[in-house]
Amino acid sequence: MSNLKINFAGIKSPNPFWLASAPPTNSGYQVMKAFDMGWGGAVWKTMGVPVVNVSSRYGAIDYRDSRMVGFNNIELITDRPLKDNLKEIEAVKRRFPDNPIIGSLMVESREEWHQIVRDVENAGVDGLELNFGCPHGMCERGMGSAVGQEPKLLELITSWVKEVARTPVIVKLTPNITDITDAARAANQGGADAISLINTIQSLMGVDIDRMVPYPVVDGKSTNGGYCGPAIKPIALNMVRNCAQLGAEKLPISGIGGIENWRDAVEYLLLGAETVQVCTAVMHYGFGIIRELLSGLDDYLKNKNIHDVSEIVGKAVANTTTWENLNLNYQVVAAIDNSKCIQCQLCYTACEDGAHQAIGLTENNRIPYIIEENCVGCNLCAIVCPVEDCISMVRKDQGQTPETWKDRLSAGNVPTSFNDPLAGGLGHHIPDPEDGIKKN
Ligand SMILES: Cc1cc2nc3c(=O)[nH]c(=O)nc-3n(C[C@H](O)[C@H](O)[C@H](O)COP(=O)(O)O)c2cc1C
């Protein structure tokens, strides 16, 4: 097996897979079961002054045959007394000394922060995670995302924690902010050892159109909650990448959001995360997904002849640039494999109405074909095609010297007015508007 051990800001873990702070880490019973099955670490359900929760609490978006593509909750932090949580943390640490437990914390005053940090560290946690991300309920009380959205406040509270903390401090960031790097920089300024992201996205899951009340329904009323699950992964990946590109201000990153399988995890690692945290997928499928996560990551590393997981951390960051640095001379066009085509014509409809009129249908049997001179290589047909590998994108440029928008700007080779002949992209054929009316 490859070496999956990691050292995250001084926290040693047998593998990079941690349970995120959430219902799966609510008790010693659950965390011991998870460690038994192979999870590397666990961020305990956020501790603070215990809360009272409502019923019901969760909502979900299903898409076609997929359940829980997006998940939402209006749950607060732990509703269990602190002393129970501490007793169970001690018990887990006794049985699993090599698996890190991170104490997730959320309180208000400086004195409360000092007290709870001492309490959880005395119980044996390996690190602390400051929950500055919860976007519902707690923020209305001045905590959670109310802190994460105010970089100065985030910096101040982080520095309070650092006054007494003996273990590494991870600041958990909220995505409910214009630029997450402002918060990441503030965490650094406050003395944090690492950041984790993302917490949930503020959301309303939908509306019960008969009762006329949004989900989840609590006695005829609802409230905004936190969105998570597979649907948020692209948003989280972008934020992780942004934080990974912070240069000298960069802190070690624990990536969170929509991780369900080993590929998702590898994507986070490649974009700069050193550990990953999982919540919704465990709430959906249970702790057993760790088997696929571990074996999939191990196989991936072996196939790439990489011995240590830390070697892949951040490997995709340098390949992520700004638009102005992309090669304008690179050109792909779609190619349809007729032996695989099931003639559903989804590619034709999508391209005809939603893109560039680059797919035609043969007169006799209405089989789609590519009109290359119109194809801008946008990928839409390949994305809508329901058959794997039926439509591929084939490189068509002649390998000219790369030329970016930035190059053109510096050469003065860009349009300067609305009618400038330099505008017009590839100059592909756009049908006469009257043709569209006639067709309908
Ligand atoms: C029901 C529920 C409760 C959660 N409670 C907490 C919490 O107490 N503290 C915290 O930092 N994050 C909490 N989270 C957020 C998760 O830790 C995680 O950041 C988020 O769900 C994104 O990961 P996922 O897409 O794998 O679910 C909660 C999430 C859910 C769904």
Image: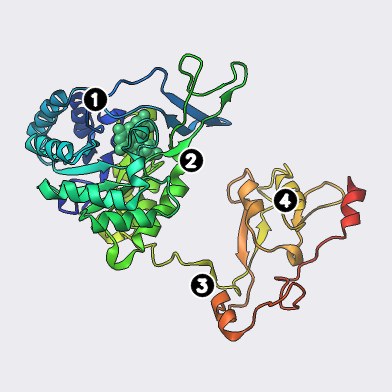
Report if the beta carbon of the residue with label 2 is closer than 8 angstroms to ligand 1.
no
Q: Separation of disc 4 and disc 1 at Cα?
A: 52 Å
Q: What residue type is labelled 2?
A: Ala
Provide residue 77's location: percent of width, then percent of height. 29, 29
Provide residue 349's location: percent of width, then percent of height. 75, 47
Read off the residue under disc 4: 354
Read off the residue under disc 2: 231
Q: Which residue is drawn at 17% across and 39% down?
A: 113
Q: Separation of disc 3 and disc 1 at Cα?
A: 50 Å
Which mark is first along the chain, 2 or 4?
2
Provide residue 273's location: percent of width, then percent of height. 31, 54
Image-quadrant location for residue 86: top left
Q: Is 81 left, or right, of 244 in this rendering?
A: left
Q: What residue type is labelled 3?
A: Asn
Q: Is 38 left, or right, of 360 in this rendering?
A: left
Give neighbour class at mark 4: few <14, some 14-19, many 20+ (Cα, 10 Å): few
Give neighbour class at mark 2: few <14, some 14-19, many 20+ (Cα, 10 Å): some
Q: What residue type is labelled 1?
A: Pro
Q: Separation of disc 1 and disc 2 at Cα?
A: 30 Å
Q: Which amino acid does label 4 sit on?
A: Gly
Give neighbour class at mark 3: few <14, some 14-19, many 20+ (Cα, 10 Å): some
Q: Is 95 left, or right, of 29 in this rendering?
A: left
Placement of the C terminus among the 4 image quadrants: top right
Task: State the mark number for residue 325.
Answer: 3
Read off the residue under disc 1: 50
